[in-house]
């Protein structure tokens, strides 16, 4: 059950990032060059209800991580955050038609292998 805190952190993080990518890609506007215009653009984006939801999900991610830190050693729990890279790669490919190269697949393969190896370490509890 305690692993649910780690996986909640991952779920909320990935979902938040996907929402931001989706909303920013629907504006079809590049980030302005002028500093003031850039600030106004980003402040306007903050008024988007989906962006606000994304920020709330980021908060939930932080709360889930705090709960996870009461149950696990950081050195055990943190490698699982690598799952966000794997999930982001595949979701960005399927949802946003972003590129998926052999180099990216090899990279996430190494991440997955690292998570698998580090998750085998014995837990002493916090």
Image (cartoon, rainbow, N blue to C red):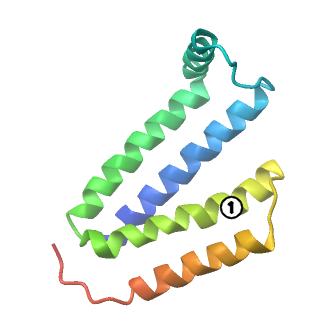
Q: Which quadrant, please, contains the N terminus?
A: bottom left
Report x, y in % for residue 26: 77, 30
Asked where in the image residue 20 lies, by quadrant, the reply is top right
Decide which of 8, 121 is in the foreground and name it.
121
Decide which of 12, 92 is in the foreground and name it.
92
Report x, y in % for residue 59: 38, 40
Above or below, 62 relative to 55: below
Q: Report the residue at 20% width, 63% height from top.
A: 70
Q: Which quadrant, please, contains the C terminus?
A: bottom left
Report x, y in % for residue 15: 57, 49
Q: Secondary structure at mark 1?
A: helix
Asked where in the image residue 64 lies, by quadrant, the reply is bottom left
The outermost residue toward the left is: 126
Q: Seen in the image, is 111 located left or right of residue 9?
A: right
Q: Seen in the image, is 102 located left or right of residue 112?
A: right
Q: Dot 1, how many residues are within 10 Å of its Cα: few (below 14), some (14-19), or many (20+)?
A: some
Q: Report the residue at 81% width, 26% height from top.
A: 28
Q: Report the residue at 56% width, 15% height from top.
A: 39
Above or below, 61 relative to 122: above
Disc 1 target residue: 89
Report x, y in % for residue 82: 50, 67
């Amino acid at each position: 059950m305690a692993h649910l805190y780690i996986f909640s952190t991952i779920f909320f993080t990935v979902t938040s990032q996907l929402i931001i990518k989706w909303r920013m890609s629907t504006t079809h506007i590049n980030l302005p060059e002028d500093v003031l215009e850039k600030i106004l653009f980003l402040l306007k984006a903050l008024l988007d209800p989906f962006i606000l939801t994304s920020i709330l999900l980021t908060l939930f991610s932080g709360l889930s991580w705090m709960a996870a830190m009461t149950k696990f050693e950081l050195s055990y729990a943190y490698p699982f955050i690598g799952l966000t890279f794997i999930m982001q790669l595949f979701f960005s490919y399927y949802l946003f038609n972003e590129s998926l190269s052999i180099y990216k697949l090899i990279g996430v393969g190494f991440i997955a292998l690292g998570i698998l190896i580090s998750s085998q370490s014995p837990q002493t509890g916090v």
